[in-house]
């Protein structure tokens, strides 16, 4: 019998009632929720097979499931890119793995960033949130001694929110550490 992740329990018990009260939803199914989290990392076109497998292994450790290698759809000579060449790897998390990754990211990884002042409050216009991390070693699953190349990470939170305000409120209630607006010096 599987257990429910603690962040999902928090979502059901506290976030849903808070959103229902603040937004006035009549039906519980109208309350926005997170559909999936997509982790994506680009790979240098000059990378050898060992480097590609290292990046794939590290992203798999962070996500908890095996990432898929993405290939170039067409050749671009200015970038020395050939059709079918590996250009990145990505993982889509849903369900229990998604909730557990979100908890680890909010509770462990983001607080370990040096001089962390919060993440941007900008959403994409449809209630989804994109977060870029320049150094993936903030995750505790990665041992720094085994890392040969520094890798960035793009994290996309896809929600069922209709507007940016709904999506921002959902993520804020889940514990996303958004930056506070700076006070003007007027």
Image: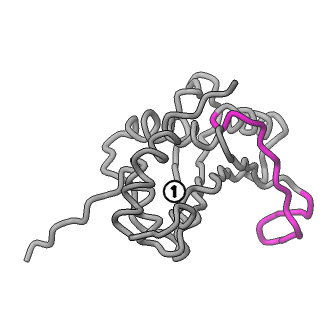
Residue in the foreground of this view, choosing between 92 and 9: 9
Quadrant (top left/top right/bottom left/bottom right) for the C terminus: bottom left
Quadrant (top left/top right/bottom left/bottom right) for the N terminus: top right
Count the marks. Answer: 1
> Would you say residue 157 is visible in this rendering?
yes
User: Element type at marker 1?
Assistant: strand
Q: Does residue 75 appear left or right of residue 56 in this picture? A: right
Q: Is residue 142 above or below residue 74?
A: above
Q: Does residue 157 appear left or right of residue 173 in this picture? A: right
Residue 76 falls within the magenta-colored stretch: yes
Highlighted magenta segment, given as a residue range: 62-84
Residue in the foreground of this view, choosing between 10 and 87: 10
> Would you say residue 138 is visible in this rendering?
no
Q: Give coordinates of residue 159: x percent, y percent.
A: 57, 62
Q: Give coordinates of residue 42: x percent, y percent.
A: 69, 53
Q: Residue at x 72, y 47 (%)?
A: 91
Q: Give coordinates of residue 58: x percent, y percent.
A: 68, 34
Colour scheme employed for the rendering of this structure: one colour
Question: Which residue is label 1 attached to?
Answer: 131
Residue in the foreground of this view, choosing between 13 and 123: 13
Q: Is residue 75 above or below residue 54?
A: below
Q: Residue at x 67, y 31 (%)?
A: 61
The dominant secondary structure in magenta is: loop
Q: Give coordinates of residue 16: x percent, y percent.
A: 45, 54
Residue 67 falls within the magenta-colored stretch: yes
Q: Residue at x 50, y 34 (%)?
A: 6
Residue in the foreground of this view, choosing between 44 and 105: 105
Considering every residue shown, the one lying at the far front of the view is 26
Occupied quadrant, residue 64: top right
Mark 1 neighbour class, 10 Å CA radius: few under 14, some 14 to 19, many 20 or more: some
Q: Residue at x 63, y 30 (%)?
A: 147
């Amino acid at each position: 019998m599987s257990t429910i992740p603690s962040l999902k329990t928090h979502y059901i018990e506290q976030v849903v009632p808070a959103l229902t009260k603040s937004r006035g939803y009549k039906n519980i199914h109208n309350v926005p929720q997170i559909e999936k989290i997509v982790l994506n990392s680009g790979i240098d076109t000059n990378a050898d097979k060992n480097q590609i497998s290292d990046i794939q292994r590290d992203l798999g450790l962070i996500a908890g499931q095996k990432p898929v290698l993405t290939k170039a759809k067409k050749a671009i000579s200015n970038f020395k890119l050939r059709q079918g060449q590996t250009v990145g790897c990505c993982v889509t998390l849903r369900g229990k793995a998604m909730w557990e990754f979100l908890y680890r990211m909010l509770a462990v990884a983001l607080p370990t960033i040096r001089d962390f002042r919060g993440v941007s409050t900008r959403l994409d216009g449809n209630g989804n949130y994109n977060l870029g991390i320049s150094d993936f070693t903030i995750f505790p699953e990665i041992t720094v001694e085994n890392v040969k190349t520094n890798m960035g990470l793009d994290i996309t939170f896809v929600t069922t929110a209709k507007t940016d305000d709904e999506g921002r409120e959902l993520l804020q209630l889940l514990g996303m550490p958004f930056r506070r607006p700076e006070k003007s010096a007027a």
